[in-house]
Amino acid sequence: MTDQTTAKMQEWATKQDAAERMIPVVGRLYRNNDVLLTVYGRSLLNKSVNGIIKAHRYARHFDGTDLDVEQTLAIVEGLESLNLGSCGIDLGRLAAAHREAGDTDLTAFLREQLGDAIGGAAEDEPAPRDVVLYGFGRIGRLLARILIDRAGGTGMRMRAVVVRRGGDNDIVKRASLLRRDSVHGKFDGTIVVDQEKNTILANGVLIQVIYSDDPSSVDYTQYGITDAIIVDNTGKWRDEAGLRKHLACPGASKVLLTAPGKGDVKNIVYGVNNADILPEDTVVSAASCTTNAITPVLKALNDEFGVRNGHVETVHSFTNDQNLIDNFHKGERRGRAAGLNMVLTETGAAKAVAKALPELAGKLSGNAIRVPTPNVSMAILNLNLARETTVEELNTFLRETSLHSPLRNQVDYMASPEVVSSDFVGSKRAGVVDGLATIVDGDRVVVYVWYDNEFGYSCQVVRCIADMAGVDTPSYPARA
């Protein structure tokens, strides 16, 4: 074995040792102090040793080099010595700030950076807001996974799901669907079903399963649920009159729809127009997965280059709305076998962009092709800009948007010649720009945006829930 090989193995072992020591501290800070640690937006909670190291390698996109795991361990141990209240701390940015500060004493530096968070939870801190999932399909179960994973540190508490009873073994089957997913893999943890009490215990989160055929017939207060945000995943009611049926239920106070809202219902794309959510709003829509994927990219491009007009073509995975084999369907072409055909269909996503981004009203057309894949879709933005640009300028701008802009939680950027759709399963961003596919011809550009139309969208929905719940968890280090 060469000296170089030995050195590399020792270097890896050192990283593993530091990551192993970091894992329990990350967990204790989250459980005891509601402190969520990230590395440039990537959570370290419940990560394996290799997951911790991989997150530190991600820092090279920002700093030009991997983040030193031993340096981060020292910071994390220093954080545990402080009496911190609920907050989010980006270790990548904090470590970069400490390096820039020179030889500053670490404890003094942390106290200066986190001054407002030191002192523990405020005595008047409100209790977590109750959340109820009305419907438990693809989006409902992913929302459950996210809320369960973040239980205790987000100001939101999943309390119940409401479904129609599907048979004697209903709750067992629904728990099994939560436990195993053909696209997103196994649930990370334990699930226990109590058939007598109709509850599912998932990683310590007790979920009441409520059976109802009518959104206005549930008394949530009999389950101890109050002031709840009802997340309607069914898509059956999309106008304000239909969604307000939920508000007739004791214990319900607000409704969020996980589909495009009709009429005067506010359609929110988090990161773009979430400031439109007012405290008095009781019915809100989180728009569609495609609208969430394309609107942040369109906003960034319009702000920087100006968008005169364009066309959005969506290549979308099939959904449960389509037929498995040829059969009658009220929609045109959607009755043909989803697993065997590309199906040309309509989409309202291009027009829906205007509800979140009014300056693009009337400027975009759109269409969609459903394809035989179960998840991850692509939007092709064919745009005419207000000025000429180049591939290099456009891609540099989009990459910087994904790293440093206020839209960094919505827009991601990828420049790999080998990625395909399945590589984006589990992406937490609303959309991922494929930089190597970008086409520029003067003022005409074509931008390709991948998106996990299930999980990425669900992450956007959770951000909307938090906004409606009035959850305002401070982040450190403070933004300039």
Image (cartoon, rainbow, N blue to C red):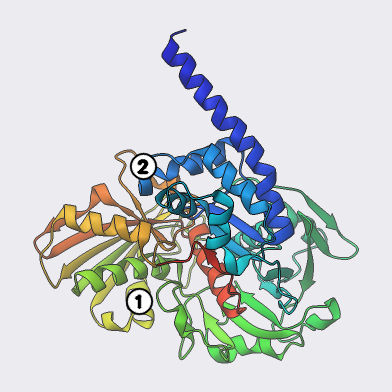
Q: Is residue 449 above or below residue 102?
A: below
Q: Is residue 131 above or below residue 322?
A: below
Q: Nearer the viewer, residue 427 or 77?
A: 77
Which element is circle 2 on? loop
Hey, which residue is sitting farthest top in the picture?
1
Q: Is residue 212 above or below residue 195?
A: below
Residue found at x 52% / y 58%: 455
Q: Nearer the viewer, residue 356 or 247?
A: 356
Image quadrant containing the C terminus:
bottom left
Q: Is residue 427 toward the left or the right of residue 122 in the image?
A: left
Residue 215: numbered disc: none
- Gap in angstroms between the C-alphas marked 2 and 1: 27 Å
Q: Is residue 277 toward the left or the right of residue 167 in the image?
A: left
Residue found at x 37% / y 72%: 349
Q: Which residue is mark 1?
A: 353
- Res 135 visible: yes
Residue 419: numbered disc: 2
Q: How many marks?
A: 2
Residue type, numbered disc 1: Val
Q: Is residue 182 toward the left or the right of residue 223 in the image?
A: left
Residue 317, percent across and down?
Answer: 43, 56
Q: Nearer the viewer, residue 24 or 137?
A: 24
Residue type, numbered disc 2: Val
Residue 300, percent across and down?
Answer: 29, 68
Q: Quadrant of residue 377?
A: bottom left
